[in-house]
Image: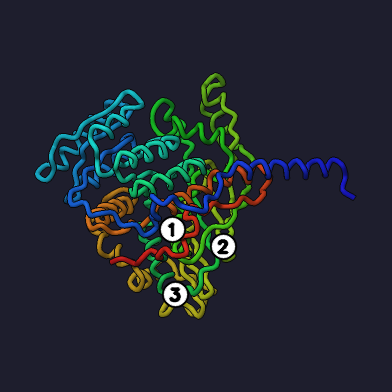
Amino acid sequence: MLKRRDFLKKTSLSAAALAATSLLPPRTSTRPATSIYMGDFAAPPIKKIKAAFIGVGARGGDHLTFFASLPGTEVVAISDLYEDNVHQWKTKAIEIGKGQHHLNPRGYFGDPEKWKNMLEEVKPDVVFIATDWGNHAPMAIEAMNQGAHAFIEVPIATTLQEMWDLVDTSERTKKHCMMMENVNYDRNELMFLNMVRMGVIGEPLHAEAAYIHELRFQQKEEQRGTGSWRTLEYAKRNGNLYPTHGLGPVAQYMNIARGEDIFKNLISYSTPARGRKLYTDKNYPADHKWSKLDFKGGDMNTSIIKTHIGRTIMVQWDETSPRPYTRHNLIQGTKGILAGFPTRVALEGGVEGITDSHHRWAQGDDLAKVYELYDHPLYKRLNELTKNSGHGGMDGMMMYRIVECLQKGLPLDQNVYEGCLWSAVAPLSERSVASDGMPQPCPDFTRGNWRETKPLAIVS
């Protein structure tokens, strides 16, 4: 017999789950006649790309550096809250662009709304946005409304409603809106994509993705910098807040939202929240602003996505625990498995010339032959040019491809729907955690058009 206390607990959880689900934005089934589907969208070529940058305190400056070094580009404006950031990167843009650019980028700083003046006055072709998470969607929406393609740091937005607004604006304005998931351009992720496309592991069935990166030191950025605002996110939110670095690549291995499959629902659980408080108690006095926070976010979150055709993806997030960095980067197929951190390959019958069965990994020195056989042609073409850019070259390769696609009028490697699907894990996980792991339906931002979208090509 179900005891009254247990009954009340179960019904309370069910009510919480229903309440959370009722907050989901409606799944719009039709697209306005004036809008177009952006899955394989190719914008008219832009011979010389004029770019504006919003937020150059950290990532934005890195993006500006490599963009400005590429032929057929011009930095026309820079906006940031702080004058010294604007001056530093304006000087850098001029230095890099000598001999190939018009050297007069305009600077905007101080007032938090200055970026709007910049968009109205400069009218750039593209806008790169690298601000705090809460500003990503509003800035991208305004950029598209002002006639610019929008390129946004991860995540693309923090709420499902913002994601629908980004999709609707991109479709209406016919402007690209790409989340800049740089990890998709890492050598190993590119090689795994190539191997999956070649059928090396058979049919993909399961993937594992993560962003496990101890970042408690960011709390030292108390007034400016990432820690000054991101610490507040850890305090007030409990879920899988930063899923896209691990999830983006495995989703493309599986052709998610690209003709083959799409996310269906998600469940999520968080551990107790311990690490941030312990770190704060150890490093800050009781009257410090960090000490007054109630850190609600669990140290480790584990989420599981079920796809339309029944495949599974485990996504983990932990920026608190003392442990080595990993993104997992695992894809399991019917004929073998590819895994990262460290990079390993196991195939049924063995990896030819290396192992004799799937009971032993090809790894370490064995991988030289694997890279020789399966390195992605894009990596082979661009590695020498981009290897000195950020994050081991992936940042430069991503920027090179953005510029190349815009100049040639090609579809981008990541579309607006992918950015929203990958980022949606965060708010969906928060709702699942709050309802004791109840499944949350994943929005189909493509409105069913994923079935007609081409898989990401293996470009050379």
Is 418 located above or below residue 13 in the figure? below
Residue 272 location in percent, x, y?
64, 40
The one of 267 and 395 positioned closer to us in this rendering: 267
Is 340 located above or below residue 152 in the figure? below
The one of 237 and 285 positioned closer to us in this rendering: 237
Q: Mark 3 points at which residue?
A: 200
Residue 122: quadrant of the picture: top left
**Side of 450 where 236 appears, left or right:** right
Question: Which residue is found at the position 45% from the left and 76% from the top?
Answer: 351
Residue most extreme to the front: 33
Q: How far apart are marks 1 and 2 (CA)?
A: 18 Å
Residue 313: quadrant of the picture: bottom right
* Circles 3, 2 touching at the beta carbon (< 8 Å): no
Pick the quarter of the image with the C terminus: bottom left
Label 3 crowd (10 A; few <14 / some 14-19 / many >=20): some
Going by the numbered disc 1, the residue's amino acid type is Pro
**Which comes sooner in the sequence, label 3 or label 2?**
3
Residue 275 location in percent, x, y?
57, 37
The one of 330 and 146 positioned closer to us in this rendering: 146
Number of on-image labels: 3
Q: Is mark 3 on a helix, strand or loop?
A: loop
Going by the numbered disc 3, the residue's amino acid type is Val
Residue 257 location in percent, x, y?
47, 60
**Side of 125 where 166 appears, left or right:** right
Residue 29 location in percent, x, y?
52, 53
Going by the numbered disc 2, the residue's amino acid type is His
Q: Name the residue under label 1.
A: 249
* Circles 1, 2 touching at the beta carbon (< 8 Å): no
Q: Name the residue under label 2.
A: 308
* Residue 342 can be seen in this image: no
